[in-house]
Amino acid sequence: MKTALSTTFGLLLLSAAVMTQAADMPVVKPMRGTVDSVQADTLSYTTRAGQHQTITLTDKTGIRLVSKADLDSIKADSFVGSAAIPQADGSLKALEVTVFEASLKGSGEGHYGWENADGSTGTMTNGTVGKLSKANGRTLTVLYKGGEKQLVVPENVPIAYVEPGQRSELKAGAKIVLFPADDGKSARGVAVGKDGFTPPM
Protein backbone atom coordinates (compact mmCIF):
# COMPACT_ATOMS: atom_id res chain seq x y z
CA MET A 1 0.00 0.00 0.00
CA LYS A 2 2.82 2.34 0.95
CA THR A 3 4.55 1.63 -2.36
CA ALA A 4 1.31 2.32 -4.26
CA LEU A 5 0.86 5.60 -2.42
CA SER A 6 4.47 6.56 -3.08
CA THR A 7 4.04 5.74 -6.77
CA THR A 8 0.82 7.77 -6.97
CA PHE A 9 2.45 10.70 -5.17
CA GLY A 10 5.45 10.43 -7.48
CA LEU A 11 3.20 10.52 -10.54
CA LEU A 12 1.38 13.56 -9.15
CA LEU A 13 4.70 15.34 -8.63
CA LEU A 14 5.82 14.38 -12.13
CA SER A 15 2.53 15.61 -13.56
CA ALA A 16 2.95 18.93 -11.73
CA ALA A 17 6.52 19.20 -13.00
CA VAL A 18 5.42 18.49 -16.57
CA MET A 19 2.66 21.10 -16.38
CA THR A 20 5.05 23.64 -14.79
CA GLN A 21 7.55 23.02 -17.57
CA ALA A 22 4.79 23.56 -20.16
CA ALA A 23 3.70 26.74 -18.37
CA ASP A 24 7.27 28.10 -18.50
CA MET A 25 7.43 27.89 -22.30
CA PRO A 26 6.55 30.86 -24.53
CA VAL A 27 2.94 30.40 -25.65
CA VAL A 28 1.82 30.88 -29.25
CA LYS A 29 -1.65 32.43 -29.36
CA PRO A 30 -3.29 32.02 -32.77
CA MET A 31 -6.53 33.78 -33.66
CA ARG A 32 -9.42 31.67 -34.91
CA GLY A 33 -12.44 32.82 -36.85
CA THR A 34 -14.24 33.23 -40.16
CA VAL A 35 -13.25 35.40 -43.13
CA ASP A 36 -15.51 38.37 -43.81
CA SER A 37 -13.59 39.88 -46.72
CA VAL A 38 -10.19 40.66 -48.19
CA GLN A 39 -9.72 44.13 -49.65
CA ALA A 40 -6.28 45.00 -50.97
CA ASP A 41 -3.95 43.85 -48.16
CA THR A 42 -6.53 43.91 -45.37
CA LEU A 43 -8.15 40.73 -44.11
CA SER A 44 -11.38 41.29 -42.18
CA TYR A 45 -12.62 38.41 -40.06
CA THR A 46 -14.96 37.57 -37.20
CA THR A 47 -13.46 35.74 -34.23
CA ARG A 48 -15.21 32.74 -32.72
CA ALA A 49 -16.26 35.05 -29.89
CA GLY A 50 -18.04 37.30 -32.43
CA GLN A 51 -15.54 40.17 -32.51
CA HIS A 52 -14.81 41.87 -35.83
CA GLN A 53 -11.08 42.23 -36.46
CA THR A 54 -8.75 43.25 -39.27
CA ILE A 55 -5.14 42.33 -39.97
CA THR A 56 -2.68 43.17 -42.73
CA LEU A 57 -1.50 40.59 -45.24
CA THR A 58 2.05 41.10 -46.52
CA ASP A 59 4.13 39.46 -49.23
CA LYS A 60 5.64 37.33 -46.44
CA THR A 61 2.30 36.05 -45.12
CA GLY A 62 2.21 32.28 -45.64
CA ILE A 63 -1.16 30.91 -46.73
CA ARG A 64 -1.82 27.25 -45.94
CA LEU A 65 -4.79 25.22 -47.18
CA VAL A 66 -6.12 22.74 -44.60
CA SER A 67 -8.36 19.77 -45.41
CA LYS A 68 -9.74 16.77 -43.54
CA ALA A 69 -7.58 13.64 -43.38
CA ASP A 70 -7.52 10.40 -41.38
CA LEU A 71 -5.20 8.40 -39.13
CA ASP A 72 -3.80 6.47 -42.08
CA SER A 73 -2.33 9.74 -43.39
CA ILE A 74 0.22 9.59 -40.56
CA LYS A 75 3.19 7.51 -41.62
CA ALA A 76 6.78 7.07 -40.54
CA ASP A 77 8.77 10.08 -41.81
CA SER A 78 5.64 12.26 -42.08
CA PHE A 79 6.20 15.82 -40.84
CA VAL A 80 3.39 16.55 -38.39
CA GLY A 81 2.20 19.16 -35.93
CA SER A 82 0.03 18.43 -32.91
CA ALA A 83 -1.67 20.52 -30.27
CA ALA A 84 -1.62 18.34 -27.19
CA ILE A 85 -1.96 18.07 -23.43
CA PRO A 86 1.07 16.90 -21.39
CA GLN A 87 0.47 13.66 -19.48
CA ALA A 88 1.88 12.55 -16.13
CA ASP A 89 4.25 10.04 -17.75
CA GLY A 90 5.82 12.74 -19.92
CA SER A 91 3.96 11.77 -23.07
CA LEU A 92 1.54 14.04 -24.93
CA LYS A 93 -2.13 13.36 -25.63
CA ALA A 94 -3.03 14.82 -29.02
CA LEU A 95 -6.01 17.14 -29.41
CA GLU A 96 -5.43 17.17 -33.18
CA VAL A 97 -2.75 16.18 -35.66
CA THR A 98 -1.81 18.06 -38.79
CA VAL A 99 0.12 16.26 -41.53
CA PHE A 100 2.19 18.60 -43.71
CA GLU A 101 2.78 18.19 -47.42
CA ALA A 102 6.42 17.22 -48.04
CA SER A 103 7.30 20.68 -49.39
CA LEU A 104 6.34 22.19 -46.01
CA LYS A 105 8.56 19.92 -43.92
CA GLY A 106 10.21 21.94 -41.15
CA SER A 107 7.31 24.38 -40.70
CA GLY A 108 7.20 25.59 -37.09
CA GLU A 109 9.54 22.80 -36.00
CA GLY A 110 9.98 22.40 -32.26
CA HIS A 111 8.06 22.00 -29.00
CA TYR A 112 6.43 25.06 -27.42
CA GLY A 113 3.45 26.39 -25.54
CA TRP A 114 0.17 26.70 -27.40
CA GLU A 115 -3.21 28.29 -26.69
CA ASN A 116 -5.88 25.75 -27.59
CA ALA A 117 -9.17 26.60 -29.26
CA ASP A 118 -10.99 26.49 -25.89
CA GLY A 119 -8.58 29.02 -24.38
CA SER A 120 -6.65 26.48 -22.31
CA THR A 121 -2.88 26.22 -22.61
CA GLY A 122 -1.18 23.08 -23.87
CA THR A 123 1.71 22.41 -26.19
CA MET A 124 2.41 22.30 -29.91
CA THR A 125 4.97 19.85 -31.25
CA ASN A 126 6.08 19.96 -34.88
CA GLY A 127 8.50 17.33 -36.07
CA THR A 128 9.14 14.19 -38.07
CA VAL A 129 7.47 10.91 -37.18
CA GLY A 130 10.01 8.23 -36.27
CA LYS A 131 8.67 5.13 -34.55
CA LEU A 132 4.95 4.55 -35.00
CA SER A 133 2.79 1.92 -33.28
CA LYS A 134 -0.93 1.11 -33.42
CA ALA A 135 -3.01 0.38 -30.32
CA ASN A 136 -6.23 2.23 -29.48
CA GLY A 137 -5.25 4.88 -32.01
CA ARG A 138 -1.55 5.47 -32.57
CA THR A 139 1.53 6.33 -30.58
CA LEU A 140 4.13 8.34 -32.45
CA THR A 141 7.69 9.28 -31.66
CA VAL A 142 7.98 12.85 -32.97
CA LEU A 143 11.55 14.02 -33.55
CA TYR A 144 12.51 17.71 -33.72
CA LYS A 145 15.72 19.68 -33.42
CA GLY A 146 16.82 19.33 -29.83
CA GLY A 147 14.48 16.59 -28.70
CA GLU A 148 11.67 14.13 -29.20
CA LYS A 149 8.21 13.49 -27.73
CA GLN A 150 5.93 10.49 -27.44
CA LEU A 151 2.56 11.49 -28.88
CA VAL A 152 -0.55 9.42 -28.17
CA VAL A 153 -3.19 9.98 -30.87
CA PRO A 154 -6.68 8.81 -29.82
CA GLU A 155 -8.87 7.53 -32.65
CA ASN A 156 -11.44 10.31 -32.24
CA VAL A 157 -9.16 13.35 -32.62
CA PRO A 158 -9.33 15.37 -35.86
CA ILE A 159 -6.59 14.76 -38.43
CA ALA A 160 -5.84 17.43 -41.04
CA TYR A 161 -3.66 17.76 -44.12
CA VAL A 162 -1.83 21.01 -44.86
CA GLU A 163 -0.57 22.15 -48.25
CA PRO A 164 0.53 25.48 -49.72
CA GLY A 165 -2.40 27.80 -50.43
CA GLN A 166 -3.20 31.01 -52.28
CA ARG A 167 -4.55 34.32 -51.03
CA SER A 168 -7.54 33.78 -53.34
CA GLU A 169 -8.67 30.99 -51.00
CA LEU A 170 -9.41 33.54 -48.26
CA LYS A 171 -13.05 33.77 -49.31
CA ALA A 172 -15.95 35.06 -47.22
CA GLY A 173 -17.14 32.30 -44.91
CA ALA A 174 -13.88 30.35 -44.91
CA LYS A 175 -12.71 29.16 -41.48
CA ILE A 176 -9.22 30.33 -40.54
CA VAL A 177 -6.50 30.06 -37.92
CA LEU A 178 -4.38 33.18 -38.05
CA PHE A 179 -0.85 33.66 -36.73
CA PRO A 180 -0.06 37.31 -35.98
CA ALA A 181 3.46 38.63 -36.60
CA ASP A 182 5.44 40.13 -33.71
CA ASP A 183 4.05 43.58 -34.50
CA GLY A 184 0.51 42.33 -33.88
CA LYS A 185 -0.71 44.24 -36.94
CA SER A 186 0.25 41.89 -39.76
CA ALA A 187 -0.19 38.16 -40.31
CA ARG A 188 2.79 35.83 -40.31
CA GLY A 189 0.57 33.05 -41.61
CA VAL A 190 -3.03 32.04 -42.20
CA ALA A 191 -4.36 28.47 -42.25
CA VAL A 192 -7.62 28.38 -44.23
CA GLY A 193 -10.05 25.47 -44.29
CA LYS A 194 -10.81 23.89 -47.65
CA ASP A 195 -14.45 23.53 -48.70
CA GLY A 196 -15.84 24.71 -45.34
CA PHE A 197 -13.46 22.62 -43.22
CA THR A 198 -12.50 24.15 -39.85
CA PRO A 199 -8.73 23.90 -39.22
CA PRO A 200 -8.48 21.99 -35.92
CA MET A 201 -5.18 23.40 -34.61
Image: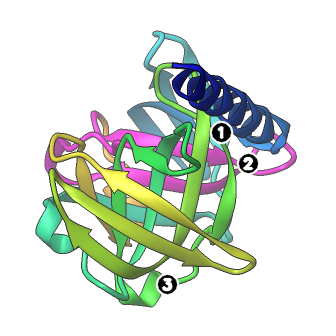
Q: Determine whether, in the image, residue 112 is placed left or right of residue 21.
A: left
- Between disc 1 and disc 2, whose residue precedes? 1
Q: CA distance from mark 3 to mark 2?
A: 24 Å
Residue at point 44%, 54% (across, down)? 191
Q: Quadrant of residue 34?
A: top left
| Marks 3 and 1, how far apart at CA | 27 Å
Q: Which residue is mark 2?
A: 186
Q: Are marks 1 and 2 in contact (CB under 8 Å)?
A: yes
Q: Position of residue 88 (x, y in %)?
A: 56, 37
**x and y percentages locating residue 71 in the rendered image:** 16, 62
Q: Is residue 196 magenta?
A: yes
Q: Which residue is mark 1?
A: 55
Crowding at dot 1, Cα within 10 Å, few <14 / some 14-19 / many 20+, comes out as some
Tag 2 or tag 3, which sits nearer the N-term? 3
Q: Secondary structure at mark 2?
A: loop
Label 3 or label 1, whichever comes before in sequence order: 1
Secondary structure, mark 1, is: strand
Label 3 residue SS: loop
- Residue 1 colored in magenta in the image: no
Between 29 and 131, the one lying in front of the other is: 131
